[in-house]
Image: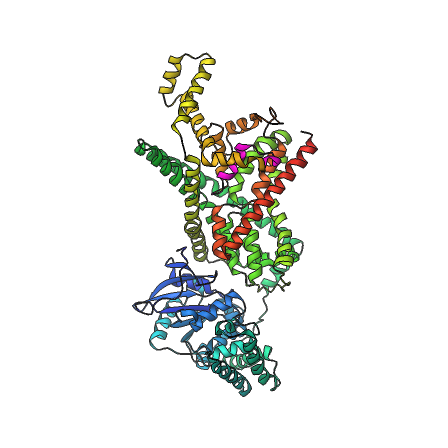
Amino acid sequence: MTAVAEGIAKPRSARHPLVALLGNPNTGKSTIFNRLTGLRQRIANYPGITIEARKGNFHAEGTTFEMLDLPGTYSLSATSPDERVVIDVLTGHGGRQRPDVVVCILDATNLKRNLFLASQLAEFNLPAVLVLNQWDVAKKRGLDFDTAALEQELGVPVLVTVGTKGEGIDSLRKAIASALGSPRRMRRIVWREEVKSAAETLQSAVRESGGQLDFAEAHRMIFDCNSAIKERLGMPEERIDAFIVEARQTIRHSGLNPSAAEAVLHYEHMDAILQRVLLDSTRSLSRGGDDSIDALLVHRVWGSLIFLGVMWVVFQSVYAWAGPFMDGIEAVSGWVQEMVAPQLEGMPVLQSLIVDGVIAGAGGVIVFLPQIFLLFFFIALLEGSGYMSRAAFLMDKLFGWCGLNGKSFVPLLSSYACAIPGVMAARSLEDPKARLTTILMAPFMSCSARLPVYVLLIGAFVEPVYGAVAAGWALFAMHLVGLAVALPLAWIMNRLILKTRPLPFILEMPSYKIPDMRNVLLKMWEGGREFILRAGTVILAFSIIIWALLYFPRSPHVAERVTAEFVAEKVAGGMSLKQIEDSLADPESVEAASLDHAVEGTYLETSYLGVFGKFVQPVFEPAGFDWKITVGVLSSFPAREVIIATLGIIYHLGPEVDAESGGLRERMAAETWHSGPRAGQPVFTVPVAFAIMVFFALCMQCAATLAVIGKQVGWRWAVASFVGMTLLAWIAAVVVYQVGTALAGV
């Protein structure tokens, strides 16, 4: 799956026929897309906007087709960004390739509502194929339609499918190929004369002003007060609005409300058709069992408890199941480093670049794949079963007061594993301001990269003092710090900065069903692959930059000085020069390892980043940070867990230490201030440990997150987010340290 911002438009020469997949949300559109394209799909950005589309190839009747999965939408009003994308593709706006065939996916259990979108599509005069999906569920509910009669009424092929089982997919392939060779267009609604006159009036007015508007676009502008189509005409907004008011007035004179006329006339048309094609509805059309289950799952008390239980299982599984795989990846990464290092023995700079920069950076990317895969697996499982919509409904009460809605729940949930998939998931939010707010709040969720920092500090300084139970609560609390801060910030942003008006939360509850495991596994694969290509490249680049800042200038005099000091210390301890020489000659000896670690620690201290860390340390001193903590914080920007290895190097233990390392915990506990008013006092105390954890909980997750935010909402917002979160993290760390120290009397 490509991470490149690939445009939808392509030259018409040497291209595959384009098939656009259109439909309401929860109709099984993505399931059919996956059935047709399989792994032959990728992500592409629409030019000029941040909404993405899935594209893929499939073969039918000897022809290779390119399929574009359009965002799910209930109408073609072109007010939300998703709807604008659909309109742009259907009209070929901005040089985009118009579809050769449009496949409109309809939910057979709710055909009347779904046909509204299909009827709007007819206005664009494109070759079309209609698909009645979830046909098995419709049959179980007692619904039966004469598809041949419906095909005759609409004028285009009508097929039935069960996407989750793959039924009808082969017939759909053949129908698409046939539609390319013998295109059939959906029969349009017969508009009242007043509506046609209004559209012609608007077309004429725009044409006289030097613009161009086809009949379908004129309809959209008349029926949708906030349609984005008028923005493309390059005319003063006041002038266009005057034309629209004049056209709408024509409809108003006929006794119709222009804002409701389209829906009224379309549904009148659909009702007449459905009466002629509906064969049997003898059984109840109620949701039956679904309503009974919803009585429990969306219950104010029981539903919330069940939701908490489900989330606990998800996160416990993500952490527990991913652990062995992550350990295995780290072991392989270490093995590769050990294999490559001797091959570059005579080239120390290149050796360090490849081993410590490239291989370590790549390992730092891949190590998160197990958690990403598992998180997307559970999200796809919950979405496929229909439960995710219920969870969003429950969460709407939690998010509603701060200007967000329940749909923000999924991106924020995703961010607990990694903010990158969370930021990308937020593109599905219809309201642009809610989308922006959700994206900016996503990095506050406590991602898995912060966990090693929490484990190290809680294990070293909280558990020994307060016990295992308190340590568990501390770990739990650290995962809530970001959420507790993010929601008030969302309120401030919506009310004072974006000035977002409260929006009603409208969410369709899909039927409960057994998830299609093919879909689940494909979404899991897509999420992991997109993480690698989007985040991985950025993390690797930043890893190499940070490596360079930590490696250079690497003066040879450093090694000479540290070696001389090491020898003098050993002699003072009673070792003879001969013993020291023999020990250092054995690379496996304790002395040789200690000297290597001391040299590396001094190199880090005198590196560009080490010097900069000492320079800015006074800024972090009010939070209790010494220069070593400060350098660790700065070096962890590519990935927050890198601070563990950095501290290992600084404390002369080597980069192979981890959060459970007893040696690192002992060194940190024994570390004291060497100068200043706190000289001789321990650097690490419980308030310092919590100050560090709070800083990590509130600062930007990593460089890759910053890069993805920049791609999604622009670098202005990304930089503002980084600066704001860093400042907030610093203030919170200072408050925690100062208050904690005062209360502890340290």
In-image side of 407 versus 635 (left or right): right
Which quadrant does the N terminus fall into? bottom left
Magenta residue check for 225: no
| Quadrant of the rendered image containing residue 409 | bottom right
**Location of residue 341 with respect to 544 vertically, above or below:** above
Residue 629: say if magenta: yes
Residue 255, horizontal then vertical, whole percent: 62, 85
The answer to whether residue 409 is left or right of residue 102 is right
Q: Is 662 drawn above or below residue 336 in the view shown? A: above
In the rendered image, which quarter contains the C terminus? top right
Viewer-proximal residue, 524 or 49? Answer: 49
Task: Identify the residue shown where x is 49% and y is 49%.
Answer: 705
Query: Residue 506: percent from the left, percent from the top?
Result: 60, 65
Task: Give percent across and percent down for residue 301.
Answer: 67, 54
**Vertical position of residue 56 compared to residue 705: above or below:** below
Q: Which residues are magenta?
A: 620-638
